[in-house]
């Protein structure tokens, strides 16, 4: 069965219930959310009542909570320890985020490995390993999915070999998985148009059993640009057919696929989410060249 969804909102008023409602409105059977704004530390208390209502709604709409994904905020940077205060903050904040995700009953938490900034790649990788060895516990149910990165700036994780080094260095690495991001992989220099060959390479370096989820995004950039600019499905340099091959690849059949494509923006300043129509494209395996018009017509009818 195709497991497909998108990034949806999570706010203090409705929390997971609101996230589930939004996903259902797009025709999804999974989704991904942040427990608060990804750029700051503000977080609401988790409501058990709203969580239980969300779980009931998900059951009624054939959304398996095992496939729902949470994303850790961007402000967590485990790769740089130049400021001990900031490094310890990142460690402690991720510990708390894991507790929040556990309370919600979510099993997968996507994490950007981090940026070494003005250090070096080896120090950055060692900092990530050290942090994860402090953070992870043997009794936690949450799996950390290290995301493949585009390689902009001093990002760690745009090479599979570096993610492998992190996994090998972490004692409780059964708590680690990998999140593939198609835009990031393209921008890092991996050819998504030859995805089966990529999976063979991934299997040799890390093992495909470690793939916990896939972020499905087209890219505004040529392969190897190392810029990280997402594009709507079929409108970028990866292309519709190549992304369909990723989504329906038999080796990833039961892996959640999550869209993080940009909202459609119009000249008058309005913008709308494309996910309902992108998911229709994906289910039908047919590219929609009128995405912009269809999205606007739907939300302004």
Image (tube, helix red, strand yellow):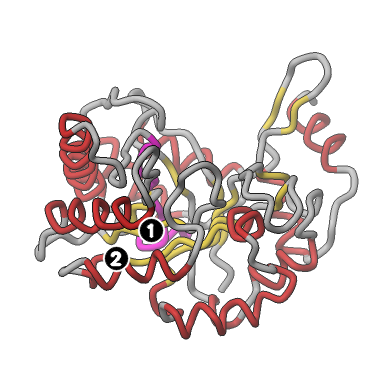
Q: Residues within 10 Å of mark 1 (few under 14, many from 20)?
A: many
Identify whether 66 is placed above or below 127: below
Residue 68 within the segment the image draws in magenta:
yes
Q: Percent position (x, y) of residue 155?
A: 46, 47
Q: Which residues are magenta?
A: 62-74
Pointers 1 and 2 in contact (C-beta within 8 Å): yes
> Of helix, strand and loop, which one carries label 1?
strand
Residue visible at 16% across and 38% down?
Answer: 92
Question: Which residue position holds label 1?
Answer: 146
Q: Percent position (x, y) of residue 232?
A: 73, 46
Tell which of 45 and 114 is nearer to you: 114
Q: Which mark is residue 176?
A: 2
Q: Percent position (x, y) of residue 91?
A: 19, 42
Image quarter where the N terminus lies is: bottom right
Residue visible at 19% across and 51% down?
Answer: 131
- Give the left or right position of residue 245, taking residue 289 as reference: left
Tell which of 65 and 269 is nearer to you: 269
Which image quadrant is residue 257 in? Answer: bottom right
Residue 92 within the segment the image draws in magenta:
no
Q: CA distance from mark 1 to mark 2?
A: 7 Å
- Give the left or right position of residue 29, taking residue 12 as reference: right
Task: Pick out the residue farthest to the top.
Answer: 268
Identify whether 16 is placed above or below 140: above
Residue visible at 35% across and 62% down?
Answer: 66
């Amino acid at each position: 069965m195709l497991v497909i969804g998108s990034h949806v909102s999570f706010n203090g008023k409705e929390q997971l219930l609101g996230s589930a409602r939004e996903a259902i409105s797009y025709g999804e059977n999974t989704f991904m959310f942040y427990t608060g704004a990804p750029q700051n530390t503000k977080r609401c208390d988790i409501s058990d009542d709203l969580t239980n209502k969300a779980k009931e709604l998900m059951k009624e709409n054939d959304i398996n909570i095992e496939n729902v994904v949470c994303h850790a905020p961007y402000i967590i940077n485990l790769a740089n320890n130049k400021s001990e205060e900031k490094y310890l903050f990142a460690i402690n904040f991720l510990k708390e985020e894991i507790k929040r995700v556990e309370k919600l009953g979510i099993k997968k938490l996507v994490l950007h490995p981090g940026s070494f900034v003005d250090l070096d790649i080896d120090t950055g990788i060692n900092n990530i390993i050290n942090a994860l060895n402090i953070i992870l516990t043997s009794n936690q149910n949450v799996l950390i999915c290290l995301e493949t990165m585009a390689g902009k700036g001093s990002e760690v994780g745009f090479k599979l070999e570096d993610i492998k080094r992190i996994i090998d260095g972490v004692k409780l690495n059964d708590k680690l998985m990998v999140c593939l991001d198609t835009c990031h992989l393209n921008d890092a220099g991996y050819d998504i148009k030859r995805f089966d060959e990529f999976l063979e390479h991934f299997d040799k370096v890390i093992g495909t059993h470690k793939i916990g989820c896939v972020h499905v995004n087209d890219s505004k950039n040529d392969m190897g640009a190392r810029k990280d600019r997402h594009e709507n499905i079929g409108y970028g340099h990866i292309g519709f057919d190549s992304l369909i091959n990723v989504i329906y690849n038999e080796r990833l059949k039961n892996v959640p696929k999550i869209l993080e494509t940009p909202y459609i923006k119009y000249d008058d300043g309005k913008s709308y989410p494309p996910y309902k129509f992108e998911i229709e494209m994906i289910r039908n395996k047919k590219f929609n060249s009128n995405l912009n018009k269809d999205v606007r017509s739907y939300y302004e009818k």
